[in-house]
Amino acid sequence: MADTTRKLLTKRIVIILICLALFVGAFSGALYFYQSDRTQKSANLLFGDDKEPNRMEVAVTLLGVDPIKGELNFRFASIPEGTYAAKEGRLAKELKFFTGIESGKAEVTLEKNRIPDPVTGSISIAKGKVSDYPFDEHSSDFFLFFSNPKDEKEEVPMALHFYGAIAGYNVDADYIPKTEFESSDSYIGLRVNVSRSVITKSFSIFLMFAMWLIGLVVFIMTMVVALQPRPIEFGMFTLIAGMLFALPAVRNLQPNVPPLGGLSDFLSFFWAESLVAVSLPILFFTWLTRYKKPS
C-alpha cells in the first residue's frame, strides 16, 4: 500500500514538473517572439553623409500604414546644419524641398530666416496585395532632394534619418537598387518595405486553426447525432446558431484584417462557416425525421 502511494505521488510530481517545464518554455518562447517582433518593427536607419558639416538633415518618420487604402503616411522634418543654418535653427538661405508626397504639395519652399515646417503627407504603396493577408508584403519608393532656386546647380548634401515603428508591422528601408536609381548625398531614393509582424502572423494563424476546430467540432457532433441513436437536445440548435454568427466576430479579431475575401478567409473562415451552416439543417432534418409517436 505504501509503495503504491509513493509511486502515485512520484507520478504526480513528474507530471507537475513536466507541465511546469512546458509552461516555462511556452512563456519564454512568447517573450522571445515579442522581443523579435519589437526589434524587427523598429527601423531606425541613417542614409547620406552625417559627417558633412554643411548639410540638411531630414528626419523621416513613418506615421502609419494602411494597406487597405494602399498608403504610407510620412512626416518629413528638416534641420539645417553648417552654412545652411542661421540662429536658432533657422535657414540661412531659401531652399526648395522635394518629397514626392501625393496628398499635398510634392515640392515645398522653405523660406530664409525661418525654422523649416515639417511636411506631412502620404505616398501610395507601389507593390503588394492586401488580399494575401497575413502574408502580404508591401513596398513603396520615395525620393528626396533640396534645391537652391537662386543656384540650380548647387548640390545640397543630406543626412536622412528614417524612423519606422508601427504596431503590427515590420518596417525596413534601404536605397533603391542602383540598377533602378543611383542615390547620392544630395539626391536620395529609398524603398520602404512593410510586412506583418511575427505576432500578427502567429495570432492570425492561431485564429485560423481555432475556426477550423470550431467548424469541425460542430460538424462531427452533428454527424454523430445524425448517424447514431443519440438524443437531440435543444441546446445543440442554439450552439450551432450561435457559432454561425460568432465565427465572423472571431475572424475580425485578426489584427488589421482586410475586408472579406482575403487569403485567410479562403484558408479557414469560409470552410468553418460552411461546416457550421451545413450542420444546422442536418440536425434539424434529423430531429424532424426521428420523431416517434408516443405509445
Image: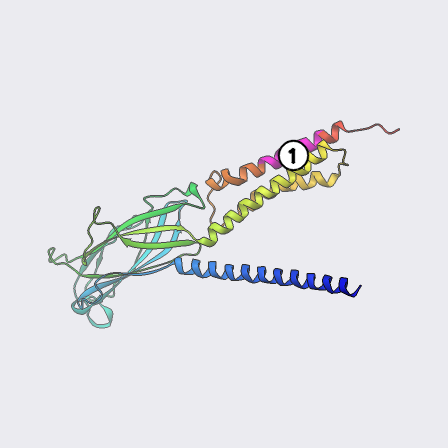
x, y (%) of residue 140? 31, 48
Residue 210 to residue 167: above or below: above
**Left or right relative to 30: residue 17:** right
Is 35 rendered above or below residue 130? below
Residue 282 is situated, as x and y percent measured from the top left of the image, at 67, 31
Residue occupying image coordinates x 16% and y 60%: 156
Residue pictured at 56% horizontal, 63% vertical: 24
Dot 1 corresponds to which residue? Answer: 279
Q: Main secondary structure of the magenta part?
A: helix
Q: Is residue 292 left or right of residue 45?
A: right
- In the rendered image, residue 60, in percent from the top left (x then y), is placed at 30, 59
Disc 1 crowd, CA 10 A, few/some/many (<14, 14-19, 20+): many
| Residue 141 highlighted magenta (yes or no) | no
Residue 280 forms part of the magenta stretch: yes
One can see residue 271 in this view: yes
Relative to 291, residue 92 above or below? below
Q: Quadrant of the N terminus?
A: bottom right
Residue placed furthest toward the front? 3
- 96 or 258, which lies in front? 258
Query: What amino acid does circle 1 point to?
Result: Ser
Query: Residue at image x 50%, y 37%?
Result: 266
Residue drawn at the location 57% of the way across and 42% of the way down = 212
Q: Which residues are magenta?
A: 274-285
Secondary structure at badge 1 equals: helix
